């Protein structure tokens, strides 16, 4: 199989081992479209479904284009689309404290004396003002009148189709069927709603715009409503700001209404509402904008006019038909979403198109390969309808029944839902996803809806690389660049250090100073450093050398410079960080009192080690390995203290074996080196991995959603499929929003993950953890297939499109819990980044050339090489 003739065999002439495949289209137009004569039963559709309107916000359906978001409630008599945009309280701040160096000296002296409770008390003096607060935009309100109260409940359907990113609502009143479609268009930067009736001239409703923010709304012309408002220039209630008259972010939302030309009229009501009477259909276009002009521009100085921008957006699409909105939205979205497929089944009969999926991985790749014109390459698999088609089982009922039925297709749905949410809340040119993505209903959301840097923001982007959505990380890198600017001031003034630093919580203004209040959460200098690890990871997966040189390396240098200055020499010869905390977790000091401030926590050292390894690797790629900074990093790295194992056999969380007052604490900071870091591995550190497993046992399986998914990923890194799957079951637990305080973790009926309340990080953490269970890769050249597959729970399945380090894409099918076939290809790598293939204890050498797909059987024998 290694001959050049075999390597250049074209895939369109290939055969499966067990079936022949027929090409559906001519080779030049559709080189990789296939069909099978096998009529497998269908898998569950990728839909979130409801049999009735939303009763709670967490029953509503999220849509988004990265910037604009909406929650669709699906009401009948009245419908609400709750809206979000780039709206925050506040103005750019001063994130420095000239008194901090004096306080820092006092804290360090107390730590050196072992007076940890006193050091904790003194560290309150290093706190700063709180972050600003994410805000809501307002509501589109649709009123259909009392006649719709007589709708036939059995006809009601509400669904979010993940394949199209479209929310659809259907119901019937008498003989008339009403249909609404909602989606957020990224190409056109509007939220689109189409409402239609099956009987001509029977569509009548009223539309208005409202907001809980300071605002004014009025009708503009014959078919538009304009809402103009402003955000508070400070938190409410006022906290630390002295300028009570600060002007906050201004915003505008404009809804444009179109109706059928052949029937219907639009009437003006109260100069605030539009009344549509007797139409066949109506299209609503919502454009919105804010005056936010970057984290360093005061709203009062912004030259952006939100109303003018929104009007210009609508003017640019005034002649665009609905079909164009829909087509461009679908094309834009599916270019990202359709890169990855996942089917899991308990039965080989029910595993949807097992053989087709061998080639779907290639289809997904070619559909996004720039050599081809993608317009000629749509692909769609059709299947024979089964007996259950048309029977809608609500997603809430599927969650409820999971404890007993353990339906693996719900796992696949939740995995893809995380990918859907990331596409919907983080796109090129938008802001970084916050604690709720972009969806928020409150003026004072939980935890300010802010970016929390001690796990939550990072987890938001965990699935971007393995789940083939690397472009969705671009807002994160823009955000890190802003943090580096503000963080250099914080580093210089607060710590008299070079480089840049960021702490535990931030906001749209790129706040880098400590949070207010207790040092147990406020005092943590590693937030920016953790984010910096994402820079090298992006290169490791994409092999984008231009990104590494122009964006990643300068930011890594600034981060490493701060860490070099932050580390202190000790008589032991090891370097230490002082003060140091393990995020949000306290300990019992030797004198029996509770404290949180000490020195050299395990997480500090793990993150620093990760950053140092990243910049050394980056310098090697860029030919900068002899730079003075890199040499200093190498010397410093060798002086970092090693991992320590506590008396009870767990990984030590602090530099000393302190007593832990909360062994079930939600954070797993001391295990960072195992995941998402790479300095602990089964191959290199078996003893530390054993201690990590015991640490996980001590922590237990209960906790907030994000904690549960972090534990899933950690168990996957340990190749512990049993415990990883048990945590899947822990998360898939339906939360009652009326009594959410009785729950820890879980899912709401719309698949949002719960802390509770709602936090989006666990949605992303779940997708990343599932990817880790199915395939893993290392920077040492290892590609590990099905490392934590729960074989008895998911005996049959296929996935395609997951990514690995080295620019490699992977597709796998398994049967009866064992590998059947794996397809691996590297589209852009210039060198063989992965050199060893692992499965079930077997390791074989592997060499990949760009532009070819390599197929391996269950014995890891390469059985086919196909030119792409």
Image (cartoon, rainbow, N blue to C red):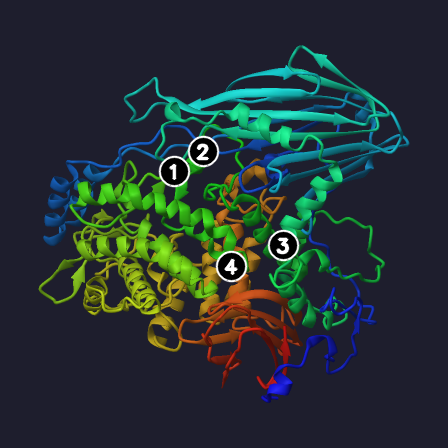
Residue 62: image location, x then y, percent: 61, 40
In the rendered structure, the answer to whether residue 819 lies left or right of residue 281 reads left
Q: Earlier in the sequence, mark 1 or mark 3?
A: 3
Label 4: how many Cα within 10 Å (few below 14, some 14–19, many 20+) = many
**Secondary structure under the numbered disc 3 in the rendered image:** helix
Instruction: Tell me if I can see residue 711 in this picture.
Output: yes
| The quarter of the displayed image where residue 34 is located | bottom right
Q: Which mark is residue 768?
A: 4
Q: CA distance from mark 1 to mark 3?
A: 30 Å
The C terminus lies in which quarter of the figure?
A: bottom right
Q: Are marks 1 and 2 in contact (CB under 8 Å)?
A: yes
The mark nearer the N terminus, 4 or 2, is 2
The circle drawn on residue 507 is 1
Badge 1 marks a residue whose secondary structure is: loop
Using the image, tell me which numbered label, if any, was put on residue 134: 2
Say which of marks 1 and 4 sits in front: 1
Q: Residue under circle 3? A: 335
Quadrant for the N terminus in the image:
bottom right
Q: Measure the alpha-carbon separation of dots 3 and 2.
A: 30 Å
């Amino acid at each position: 199989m290694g001959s050049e003739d075999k390597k250049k065999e074209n895939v369109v002439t290939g055969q499966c081992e067990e079936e022949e495949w027929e090409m559906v289209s001519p080779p030049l137009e559709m080189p990789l479209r296939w069909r099978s004569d096998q009529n497998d039963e269908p898998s569950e559709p990728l839909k979130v479904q409801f049999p009735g309107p939303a009763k709670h916000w967490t029953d509503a359906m999220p849509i988004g284009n990265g910037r604009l978001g909406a929650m669709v409630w699906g009401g009948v008599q009245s419908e609400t689309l709750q809206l979000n945009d780039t709206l925050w309280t506040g103005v750019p701040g001063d994130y420095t404290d000239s008194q901090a160096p004096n306080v820092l000296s006092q804290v360090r002296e107390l730590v050196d004396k072992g007076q940890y409770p006193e050091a904790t008390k003194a560290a309150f003096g290093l706190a700063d003002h709180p972050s600003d607060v994410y805000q809501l935009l307002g509501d589109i309100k649709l009123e259909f009148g009392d006649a719709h109260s007589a709708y036939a409940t059995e006809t009601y359907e509400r669904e979010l189709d993940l394949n199209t990113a479209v929310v659809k609502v259907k119901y019937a009143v008498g003989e008339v069927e009403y249909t609404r479609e909602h989606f957020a268009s990224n190409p056109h930067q509007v939220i689109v709603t189409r409402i239609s009736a099956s009987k001509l001239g029977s569509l009548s409703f009223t539309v208005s715009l409202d907001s809980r923010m300071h605002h004014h709304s009025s009708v503009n012309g014959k078919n538009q409503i304009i809402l103009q408002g402003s955000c508070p220039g400070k938190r409410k209630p006022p906290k630390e700001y002295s300028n009570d008259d600060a002007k906050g972010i201004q915003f505008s939302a404009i809804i444009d209404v179109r109706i059928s030309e052949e029937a219907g009229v639009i009437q003006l009501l109260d100069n605030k509402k539009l009344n549509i009477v007797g139409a066949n259909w109506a299209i609503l276009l919502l454009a919105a904008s804010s005056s936010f002009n970057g984290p360093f521009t005061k709203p009062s100085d912004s030259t952006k006019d939100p109303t003018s921008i929104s009007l210009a957006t609508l003017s640019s699409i005034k002649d665009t038909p609905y079909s164009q909105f829909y087509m461009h939205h679908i094309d834009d979205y599916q270019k990202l979403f359709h890169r990855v497929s996942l089917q899991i089944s308990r039965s080989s009969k029910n595993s949807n198109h097992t053989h087709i999926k061998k080639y779907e991985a290639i289809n997904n790749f070619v559909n996004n390969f720039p050599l081809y014109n993608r317009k000629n390459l749509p692909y769609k698999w059709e299947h024979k309808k089964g007996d259950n088609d048309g029977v809608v089982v609500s997603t809430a009922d599927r969650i409820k029944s999971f404890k007993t039925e353990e339906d693996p297709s719900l796992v696949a749905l939740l995995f893809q839902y995380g990918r859907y949410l990331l596409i919907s809340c983080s796109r090129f040119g938008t802001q970084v996803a916050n604690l709720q993505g972009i969806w928020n209903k409150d003026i004072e959301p939980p935890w300010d809806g802010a970016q929390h840097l001690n796990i939550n923001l990072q987890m938001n982007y965990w699935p971007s690389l393995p789940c083939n959505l690397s472009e969705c990380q671009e807002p994160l890198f823009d955000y890190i660049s802003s943090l580096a600017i503000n963080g250099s001031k914080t580093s210089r003034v607060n710590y008299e250090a070079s480089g840049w630093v960021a702490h535990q919580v931030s906001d749209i203004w790129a706040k880098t100073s400590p949070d207010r209040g207790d040092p147990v959460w406020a005092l943590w200098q590693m937030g920016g450093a953790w984010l910096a690890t994402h820079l090298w990871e992006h290169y490791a997966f994409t092999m984008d050398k231009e990104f590494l040189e122009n964006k990643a390396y300068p930011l890594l240098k600034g981060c490493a410079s701060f860490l070099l200055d932050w580390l202190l020499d000790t008589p032991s010869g090891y370097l230490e960080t002082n003060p140091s905390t393990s995020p949000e977790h306290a300990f019992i000091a030797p004198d029996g009192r509770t404290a949180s401030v000490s020195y050299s926590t395990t997480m500090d050292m793990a993150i620093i080690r990760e950053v140092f390894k990243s910049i050394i690797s980056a310098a090697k790629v860029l030919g900068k390995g002899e730079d003075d900074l890199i040499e200093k990093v190498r010397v410093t790295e060798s002086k970092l203290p090693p991992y320590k194992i506590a008396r009870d056999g767990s990984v030590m969380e602090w530099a000393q074996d302190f007593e832990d007052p909360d062994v079930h604490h939600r954070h797993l900071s001391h295990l960072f080196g195992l995941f998402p870091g790479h300095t602990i591995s089964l191959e290199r550190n078996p003893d530390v991995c054993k201690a990590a497993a015991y640490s996980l046992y001590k922590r237990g399986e209960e906790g907030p959603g994000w904690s549960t998914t972090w534990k899933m990923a950690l168990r996957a890194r340990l190749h512990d499929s049993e415990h990883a799957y048990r945590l899947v079951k822990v998360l898939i637990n339906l939360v009652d929003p009326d009594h959410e305080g009785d729950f820890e973790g879980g899912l709401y009926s719309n698949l949002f993950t719960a802390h509770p309340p709602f936090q989006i990080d666990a949605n992303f953490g779940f997708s990343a953890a599932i990817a880790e269970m199915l395939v893993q890769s290392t920077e040492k050249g290892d590609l590990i297939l099905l490392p934590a597959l729960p074989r008895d729970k998911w005996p049959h399945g296929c996935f395609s499109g997951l990514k690995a380090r080295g620019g490699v894409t992977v597709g796998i099918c398994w049967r009866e819990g064992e590998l059947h076939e794996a397809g691996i290809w590297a589209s852009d790598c210039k060198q063989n980044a992965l050199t060893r293939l692992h499965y079930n204890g077997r390791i074989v050498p592997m060499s990949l050339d760009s532009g070819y797909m390599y197929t391996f059987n269950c014995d890891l024998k390469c059985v086919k090489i196909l030119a792409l």
